[in-house]
Amino acid sequence: MPRYQATLLIELKDGILDPQGRAVEGVLQGLGHPVESVRVGKVLEVVFQAENLLQAEEKAKALGKLLANPVMEVFALEALKELP
Amino acid sequence: MKWAIVRFPGSNCDEDARFALEKAGIRAEFVWHTAQDLRGFDGVFLPGGFSYGDYLRAGALAAKSPVMAEVRRFAQEGRYVIGVCNGFQVLTEAGLLPGALLANLNLHFTCKEVGVRVERTDLPFTRLYRQGQVLRLPIAHAEGRYYADPETLKRLEGEGQVVFRYAPLGEEAHYNPNGSLNDIAGIVNERGNVLGMMPHPERAVDPILGGEDGLPLFLGLVQEVAG
């Protein structure tokens, strides 16, 4: 069966205060980088087997649903590729 | 009366929980997170600590442990479940309590005594407290900022599910240690048998520990059964 690598991005929902992002933002501004805002999220790279790309996408989304907490997070499937 | 204390990899308040339960006259047994049978127990205690090193999110991986399916069944039967600190985080991650616990506003791991006001006394956990009583309890966490969407928050307040709220011990203006919405320190489910709280009652059950304000919570559980 082909192997796939999914890149899942998990972020805090809009409107939820991210103190980690705020801290990074403060440091960047202190270094003279006038950034507007910073938010910190998580990237997960998951490798698994699937019949085809369509099934791989379904599996990847199911994993994102399992690993993100819908109370305060959203996830996005950023990339999906077949591995050699 | 016998309670189970669930040990996840990284739990570290398990012995404190045993000390508190036994001091209240409750038999306590440790149960590993792979356990699939909680028959014979009257209650389950999910202790504080850093299950799975807080990886992914605090409590997220522990919430998927085999034992949690059994804790869910246990709760559905109306039996008592208490989660303190990391245990509270596990209960929200498992969906047994609404909302979530996010990083403290100041990003610090905060370890100190705080004031905690008792908001209702009709529960076994709080029946030995006075309405509005302000307890002195320790907190020790980095992710304790209670969050729920506005609708959930409204429902929690409307149904009286907020059991404990941060409150000033004296005159201090900044008594909310982590930025929790509505100063929420502890909540119950709708049925009132699953309690989650960030402060540690089990660390305040003996004068030598700096206070005994946590002890009535455990003594109340015994009275519930004795009637």
Image (cartoon, rainbow, N blue to C red):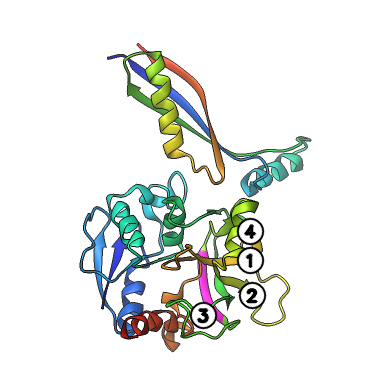
Label 1, secondary structure: give it. helix
Q: Residues within 10 Å of mark 2 (few under 14, many from 20)?
A: many
Q: Amino acid at mark 4?
A: Lys
Q: Which mark is residue B183?
A: 1
Helix, strand or loop for the magenta stretch, by majority: strand
Label 2, secondary structure: give it. strand
Of discs 4 and 1, which sits in the foreground?
A: 4
Q: Quadrant of residue A64?
A: top left
Subunit ID for the residue under disc 4? B
Q: Amino acid at mark 2?
A: Ala
Q: Which mark is residue B167?
A: 2
For marks 1 and 2, the one nearer the N-term is 2
Subunit ID for the residue under disc 1? B
- Please identify the quadrant where the N terminus of chain A is shown: top left
Q: Residue at x 45, y 43 (%)?
A: B56
Q: Nearer the viewer, residue B40 or A20?
A: B40
